[in-house]
Image: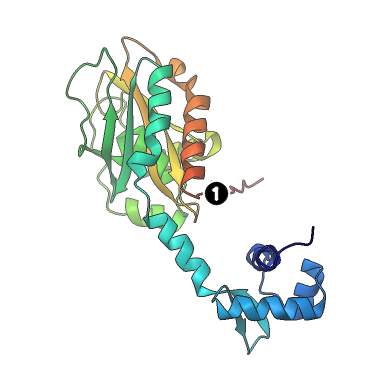
Amino acid sequence: MQSSIVQKLMSVVTVISAAHKPLTFSELVRETGLNKSTLHRLISIGMSEDLIQYDKSSKVYLLGPKVFDLVRNAYTGYDIQTVALDEMMRLYGLFDANVTLGVPSGTDVVYLRLIEAKGSVGNFQRPGMREPVHCSASGKALLAFLPEAVIDAKLSDHVFEKFTERTITDADTFRTALQTVRAQGYATNDREEYDHFLGISAPIFNYMSEPIAVLNIWTVHTRHNIEDIKGWSDALLSATHKVTQLIGGKAPVLTHSA
């Protein structure tokens, strides 16, 4: 069956979006495999619908403004608490621990939702509670995947307040911890803010590969140790990957120096 005009138009838009640089008409002919007359017609339709735009000075084709409007509307149109709830419940069912959803706020993490374990120790985390990034797994997970310049700006005047003997109290040690987070994909907190709490966190990414939220599983050291909760990392990463996909996001492609 012959492809519909919509399918052909979307194939052209896809080629333009996947290209590493804006493409000329000849390059589009080569990349799409379409004949010139068909491609001309599809480009004309795409331009009329603002899906494709033409740069006259460079004689190249780019994505049109409507594509970015659609992505932006999709990104702002969801409630991260609703989207993440199923995965939070799944994690809650797997482990005898608390599960939280947090978002960044300056150099703090603000928790939006908590699913409390049956044997919870009480009013530790509640919706609206804030934690500094340097002593929380959630904070490390949110900062680790930001551009270095953004990390520098956030840490430039950050006060590394000491809460326990395990708290990271200087920027250099904290940056080393962020390198570990990037390497393994998740962050840990081994009694760095409170003497009896430890946890594991992983980020949720938007369509620009920016960390915009974090899922966290936390417990008390009388029930679990740090190696126990590291064993939960595969399930946690699976959950954050699922939520990332549901909001149309993608994890960043990390490059490692030799």
Residue 55 visible from this viewpoint: yes
Quadrant of the image occupied by residue 51:
bottom right
| Residue under the point 79% across and 57% down | 1
Image height check: is 186 above or below 152? above
- Say what amino acid the circle numbered 1 marks: Pro
Tell which residue pokes out farthest to the front in this image: 1
| Residue under the point 32% across and 39% down | 102
Residue 172 visible from this viewpoint: no
Percent across and percent down for residue 130 are 22, 39
Percent across and percent down for residue 30 are 81, 71
Give the structural element (helix, strand or loop) at label 1: loop
Q: Quadrant of the C terminus?
A: top right
| Residue under the point 27% across and 22% down | 116
Quadrant of the image occupied by residue 164:
top left
* Mark 1 neighbour class, 10 Å CA radius: few under 14, some 14 to 19, many 20 or more: some
Image height check: is 58 above or below 66? below
Tell which residue pokes out farthest to the top in this image: 222
14 sits to left or right of 233: right
